[in-house]
Amino acid sequence: MRTKPLFFLLMLAILCPASIKAADLVVSGCDAEDYLNNNGAMWIDDIETSFRSSSAGMLAKKGADYNTRVFTVSGPINEEDLAVLWEASLLGNLVEIDLGEAELEGGIVPDFAFWNESGQVDTQCGHTRYLRLKKIVLPKNCVEIGKYAFANAINLDEVVFPAGLEKIDESAFYNCGIKEVVLPSSCVTFDGTSHFMHNVNLGKMYLPEGIESIPAGFVEECIFLEDIRIPATVKHIGDRAFLKCRSLKSIELPPALETIGDLAFFAVDAMERISFPATLKSLGKRCCEYMTVMRNIYCAASEPPVCEKLDTDTQSVYKPFGVNRINYNKITWEGARIHVPVGSAEKYRKAWGWDYFTNFVETEEFPDAAVEEVITDDDVAARVLYDLHGRQVLNPQEGHLYISEGKTIVYKKK
């Protein structure tokens, strides 16, 4: 591969500044004329390119640069411009894209922006070609990421989300290599399912307050996920949301949680303890099966949460925690200690699903760090209560969570 001498590049910058400016292009370590004339077939490895766009579609007109490894774009861009970056990462050497100063048309990363099945999957042998992309900084004006936008970007290990992001659509980051996800406070809407499914390198995830539901398959098969923050506003955890998150040793369930979907914690086999809040109403089909090392389950609900049955289970043997009498070494242990409110043990023993267990312990102590205080009728009159959205509550409901004097409290009748 030929390499151009440094003095030649300096002479080019001195003698041809107008041509470079006219191209709205700043290229470090390459010839700008070569970039324009040869559609990016340049001679120098490991270059960084900065592109200033004056109108959307301008980058698309110039074509893909296969040799640039780091590409920074500012100014207006659209779907066609993103397609050029996709091509450069698929067929070229592009590994890092910085769109932080770009103005994305409509503020939406389009569906399938960086995943093109027809262009990446060989129809004859089924072989998939993957992007080289490792990092992307999304535009500041980006408010939505479309479905499958970055699906199967297996080398993508870092995404910088903009402060104003509001919505992530179905499977947007399915099968990527992301290591950490920190979403901005504005991002509380998730359409569809499987948004971060099968990110096998994902270790940490922090979700903002305001989310009310964890979608189905949200982080399914993220086998190295160890740390996830679920906001207190969540009331529902969807089907398969944490299925096979095999490194998750502990999780703090939100204090207002009401339902847990089918297979939600299936094969989360590193978890030793789980604490269900007093607000929990139902457990989905096989939602806590194959929790191999589970030894303590706390449930603060005075009435046993309803356990859903499989439609095809005519003999009613498949319970949320497993099947009795086939308790081999990979299934949730029947002898785990089930900690329940005082006076409720007999209810749990007789409730279908909970009758899977044999060891019930009545207690007033529940390891729920989210609840800082329990109040009764005598306390309500002297307190100003707010719900988890900051709205004042005049008639509190038993078992519901409220905020008062900076503390998270639960109300129980005397």
Image (cartoon, rainbow, N blue to C red):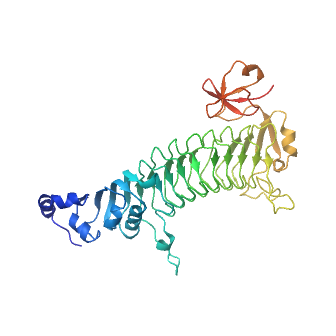
User: Which quadrant of the view contains residue 20?
Assistant: bottom left
Q: List x then y, in percent, for residue 195.
A: 57, 56
User: Which quadrant of the view contains residue 36?
Assistant: bottom left
Whether residue 3 is visible here, answered yes or no, is: yes
Whether residue 272 is visible here, answered yes or no, is: no
Q: Is residue 118 above or below residue 186?
A: below
Residue lying at 33% horizontally and 58% vertically, measured from the top left: 71
Q: List x then y, in percent, for residue 368.
A: 67, 35
Residue lying at 48% horizontally and 68% vertically, measured from the top left: 116
Q: List x then y, in percent, for residue 326.
A: 80, 59
Q: Does residue 12 appear to the left or right of 23 in the view shown?
A: left
Q: Is residue 374 above or below residue 368?
A: above
Nearer to me, 245 or 378: 378
- For the image, the number of numbered tags is 0
Residue ranking furthest to the bottom: 124
Q: Quadrant of the N terminus?
A: bottom left
User: Which quadrant of the view contains residue 387?
Assistant: top right
Residue ranking furthest to the top: 382
Q: Does residue 102 appear to the left or right of 22 in the view shown?
A: right
Nearer to me, 236 or 290: 236
Q: Is residue 206 above or below residue 245?
A: above
Nearer to me, 125 or 74: 74
Q: List x then y, in percent, for residue 65.
A: 32, 66
Q: Quadrant of the C terminus?
A: top right
Nearer to me, 38 or 363: 38
